[in-house]
């Protein structure tokens, strides 16, 4: 373990995150809000600690997979801790565990909250909650690679692999730094387009900006107690539905569109599965809930919004889906586990992993029937390396183990089995709303401090694809080479 290089990079990242937190700090100072002290304190602490860690450049700057995992996990935990300080210092969230939970939920784009009255929060706090979604959506380290000087991102593929969601991380251009810049360029552009569309639909600039931050990060922190339902606007529902769906797509496909490689986009197998599953789910749920609404088109409006919100793991709400028929609730829960495309800002298991598992199962059945048959697993017409297939199976195994342990630990609280199951499911898949006590009109405030820490771990593990958080707590990680 190259401790000096890990500390140095963590310091550089803390300085950048401290600078990013200057945005809500300025809002708090200009509006004379009581959050000013907390934001200033957090910024100063991050800059101070970052400065100490970067006072001397390490002689040996090599980082490998292990360092990459530790850096990623460490950054997300530290940014969540420092990000929680303004909530706690202003007493808008009196418990630091609650503040930490809220901030982890923000950076991991989960959208699970412990707040009962969101509209009572200060403007700076509302901005910081939604902005944390936007930062965490594309990834803290992806942003850092886009802005750090060239000499500080050597061997950055190890960082990218540890943070980017999906079974494998690739490059759009020769250098990872260039890839990071392209991704963030697309990310910013699409976010700004959504801001403009929401303003044209009649929303104020502040509402448009913050809702766009949450949509872009597929996070779901709303600035209204009733979430997006508070606007009661067909235009707003349609705009956010479309952009949630777009942010659930692999961002490399947007790059292909920009380079006019339309054929390759349409041939993308994961995209076809994603669109097909979403459209079929919208139609089935819409038909199933039609008796509860005036006509099919109204039912389809709410069906489309909730299906896309859940499958992209955004978690915005326009209807209390726990009052829908069981078929619709079941479909939403299945979509919750599936998640969006790899390489998107969405969470969940990922469509590409689902495809690989299905094809791997079919391939194994063929081998059992005909032992001499060669049945490779293909994705997008290309034969997948056995290591990729193995990594997907390993991910599923780790996923199940973490899920079971978390569920057992949550059972120490007094909530029902369904509530605990839904809480773990929605946190590890970075969705936000679940069922029963953690349903769309409830929150996570009733859980004990211990359970909130467990769920915070689940949110971090889910956003970082499990392995970095597991590696961080493995004793072998900290042994010197």
Image (cartoon, grey):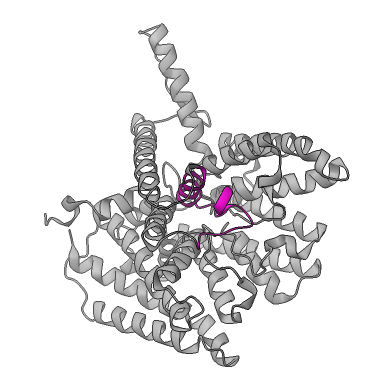
Determine if the magenta segment contains residue 287: no
Q: Is residue 326 above or below residue 76?
A: above
Numbered-mark total: 0
Q: Position of residue 4 (x, y in %)?
A: 19, 69
Instruction: Identify which residue is drawn at 42% across, 41% down.
Output: 167
Q: Is residue 115 above or below residue 432?
A: below
Determine if the magenta segment contains residue 424: yes
Kindly give the residue lying farthest to the right in the view shown: 294
Q: Position of residue 349 (x, y in %)?
A: 48, 41
Relative horizontal placement of residue 451, taking residue 68 as reference (left or right): right
Residue 141 or residue 76, whichever sits in front: 76
Quadrant holding the C terminus: bottom left
Q: Is residue 183 above or below residue 358?
A: below
Instruction: Identify which residue is drawn at 33% across, 33% down.
Output: 387
Residue 108 or residue 192, whichever sits in front: 108
The residue range painted magenta reads 418-445
């Amino acid at each position: 373990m190259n401790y000096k290089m890990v500390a140095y990079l963590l310091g550089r990242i803390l300085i950048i995150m401290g600078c990013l937190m200057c945005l809500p700090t300025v809002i708090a100072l200009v509006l004379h809000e009581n959050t000013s002290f907390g934001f200033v304190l957090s910024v100063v602490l991050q800059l101070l600690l970052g400065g100490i860690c970067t006072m001397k450049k390490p002689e040996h700057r090599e980082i490998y997979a292990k360092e990459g995992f530790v850096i990623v996990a460490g950054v997300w935990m530290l940014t969540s801790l420092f990000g929680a300080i303004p909530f706690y210092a202003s007493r808008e969230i009196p418990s630091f565990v609650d503040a930490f939970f809220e901030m982890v939920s923000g950076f991991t784009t989960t959208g699970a909250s412990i707040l009962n009255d969101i509209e009572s929060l200060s403007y700076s706090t509302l901005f910081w909650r939604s902005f944390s979604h936007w930062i965490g959506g594309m990834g803290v380290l992806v942003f850092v690679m886009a802005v750090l000087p060239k000499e500080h991102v050597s061997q950055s593929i190890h960082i990218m692999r540890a943070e980017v969601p999906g079974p494998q991380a690739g490059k759009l251009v020769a250098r990872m730094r260039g890839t990071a810049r392209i991704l963030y360029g697309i990310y910013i552009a699409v976010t700004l387009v959504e801001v403009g569309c929401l303003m044209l639909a009649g929303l104020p600039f502040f509402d448009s900006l913050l809702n766009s931050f949450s949509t872009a990060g597929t996070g779901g922190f709303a600035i209204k107690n009733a979430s997006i339902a508070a606007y009661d606007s067909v235009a707003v529902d349609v705009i956010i539905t479309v952009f949630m769906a777009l942010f659930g797509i692999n961002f490399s496909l947007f790059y292909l569109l920009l380079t006019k490689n339309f054929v390759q986009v349409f041939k993308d197998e994961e995209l076809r599965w994603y669109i097909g599953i979403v459209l079929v789910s919208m139609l089935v749920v819409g038909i199933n809930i039609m008796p509860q609404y005036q006509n099919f088109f109204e039912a389809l409006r709410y069906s489309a919004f909730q299906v896309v919100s859940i499958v992209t793991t955004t978690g915005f709400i326009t209807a209390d889906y726990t009052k829908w028929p069981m078929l619709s609730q079941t479909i939403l829960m299945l979509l919750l586990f599936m998640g969006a495309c790899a390489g998107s800002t969405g969470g969940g298991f990922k469509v590409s992993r689902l495809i690989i598992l299905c094809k791997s199962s079919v391939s194994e059945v063929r081998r059992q029937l005909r032992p001499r048959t060669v049945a490779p697993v293909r994705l997008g017409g290309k034969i997948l390396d056995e290591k990729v297939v193995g990594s997907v199976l390993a991910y599923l195994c780790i996923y199940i183990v973490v899920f079971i342990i978390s569920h057992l630990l949550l059972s120490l609280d007094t909530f029902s089995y369904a509530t605990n199951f839904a809480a773990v499911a929605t946190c590890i898949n970075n969705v936000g709303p679940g069922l029963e006590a953690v349903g769309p009109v409830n929150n996570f405030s009733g859980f004990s401090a211990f359970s909130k820490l467990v769920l915070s771990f689940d949110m971090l593990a889910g956003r970082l694809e499990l392995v970095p958080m597991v590696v961080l707590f493995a004793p072998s990680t900290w042994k010197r080479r």
